[in-house]
């Protein structure tokens, strides 16, 4: 698959383009779909994917995007695609209760950046909001976005943590993410809510992501940190597809699902790849610790198929985007952080 993308409109179109698996999933799925926290990095493209796949399947359903929506441009873009907009403060119980009932919920709300400065707010977003949502939508299927940060750091030779491995979150951000999972698990066990805990490990959409962070450092002549020497990554369109199709996998008690690419990527190797592409030297700082936050996604791939885009294709796409002057969201992943302080 070629990812020679030169404009944001083209990128947004590619990120929300349904594959045959998405269309078939929407043909089988009953009910409307709501994306909560739809104003963030992944929400708009995921909501548009749900709309486009449903239309291609010939299924008449509402696709609703709910968020505070700080950007009118995002709202306008969603409405042009046929997605309904609901402005909602998910921290406010009255606002959440006013949301329409919906059989299928994709829960994307969460907080990471700045979590060290306001840990109380991080915990509120990552645990209070899930409680309000799980209470309101206890009769729905819920794909609850989580993270590989709930796992301990492991050696690359381990091939990554598996879903049955015991959580060991480092730092308050990761602890609050485990708290989010426990809230959904509680409602699932107590009220029978069908849930997938969608443990996504580093989506990349050319404007942000670990590969983008590394590539821009090399392109700008800045040193690449080696403190965490390996990572997982997945093309955001593949992550969107997995999320949409995971609605059919919801169950009670919840199903945990690691979601990432097929490869474990070396920071050093990725930096050298970008150095070759850009004709620049790669410089490094720090020392590899020998462990990293790594997820084993074999369960996801067995259930839903392997990602359409490989790590090599993704690195080529990132390099091409940067060379063409493509915009960055300026939201670093802090992939090099080992103590959980974001």
Image (cartoon, grey):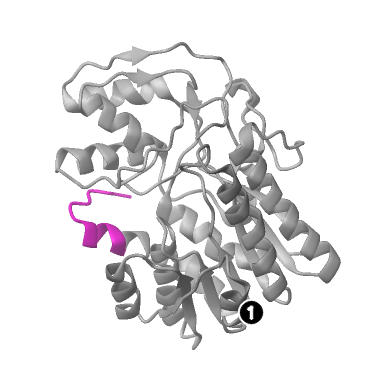
Residue at 28% x, 27% y is 217
Figure check: 99 above or below 230: below
- Residue 147, by quadrant, is top right
- Residue 80, by quadrant, is bottom left
How far across and how far down the image is residue 272, in percent? Answer: 30, 20
How far across and how far down the image is residue 227, in percent? Answer: 48, 18
How far across and how far down the image is residue 276, in percent? Answer: 22, 22
Observer-nearest of 277 and 340: 340
| Left or right relative to 219: residue 135 | right
- Going by the picture, which residue comes out furthest to the bottom? 60
Magenta residues, start to end: 1-13
Figure check: 162 above or below 59: above
Observer-nearest of 136 and 41: 136
Q: Is residue 250 visible?
A: no
Give the mark count: 1
Residue at 60% x, 47% y is 120
In the rendered image, residue 295 lying in the magenta stretch gets the answer: no
Q: Is residue 181 visible?
A: yes
How far across and how far down the image is residue 221, in percent? Answer: 21, 21
| Left or right relative to 321: residue 101 | right
| Left or right relative to 203: residue 214 | left
Observer-nearest of 48 and 14: 48
| Left or right relative to 209: residue 272 | left
**SS of the residue at dot 1?**
loop
- Going by the picture, which residue comes out furthest to the right? 190
Residue at 46% x, 11% y is 287
Where does label 1 land, which residue?
103
């Amino acid at each position: 698959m070629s990812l020679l993308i030169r404009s944001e409109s083209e990128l947004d179109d590619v990120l929300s383009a349904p594959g045959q698996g998405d269309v078939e999933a929407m043909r089988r799925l009953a009910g409307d779909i709501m994306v909560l926290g739809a104003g963030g990095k992944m929400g708009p493209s995921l909501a548009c994917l749900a709309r486009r796949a449903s239309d291609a399947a010939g299924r008449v359903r509402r696709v609703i995007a709910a968020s505070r929506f700080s950007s009118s441009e995002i709202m306008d873009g969603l409405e042009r695609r046929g997605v309904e907009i609901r402005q909602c403060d998910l921290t406010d119980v009255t606002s959440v209760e006013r949301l329409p009932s919906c059989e299928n919920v994709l829960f994307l709300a969460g907080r990471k950046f700045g979590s060290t400065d306001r840990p109380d707010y991080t915990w509120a977003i990552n645990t209070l909001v899930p409680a309000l949502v799980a209470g309101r939508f206890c009769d729905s299927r819920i794909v609850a976005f989580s993270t590989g940060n709930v796992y301990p750091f492991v050696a690359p030779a381990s091939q990554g943590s598996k879903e049955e491995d015991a959580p060991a979150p480092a730092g308050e951000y990761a602890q609050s993410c485990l708290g989010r999972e426990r809230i959904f698990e509680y409602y699932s066990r107590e009220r029978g809510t069908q849930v997938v805990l969608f443990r996504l490990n580093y989506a990349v959409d050319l404007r942000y992501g670990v590969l983008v962070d590394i590539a821009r450092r090399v392109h700008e002549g800045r040193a690449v940190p080696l403190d965490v020497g390996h990572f997982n990554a997945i093309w955001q369109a593949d992550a969107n597809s997995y999320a949409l199709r995971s609605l059919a996998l919801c169950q009670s008690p919840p199903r945990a699902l690691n979601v990432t690419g097929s490869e474990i990527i070396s920071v050093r190797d990725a930096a050298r790849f970008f150095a070759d592409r850009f004709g620049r030297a790669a410089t490094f700082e720090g020392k590899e610790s020998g462990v990293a936050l790594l997820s084993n996604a074999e369960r996801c791939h067995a259930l839903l198929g392997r990602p359409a885009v490989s790590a090599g294709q993704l690195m080529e796409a990132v390099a091409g985007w940067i060379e063409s002057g493509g915009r960055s969201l300026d939201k670093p992943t802090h992939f090099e952080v080992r103590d959980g302080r974001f």
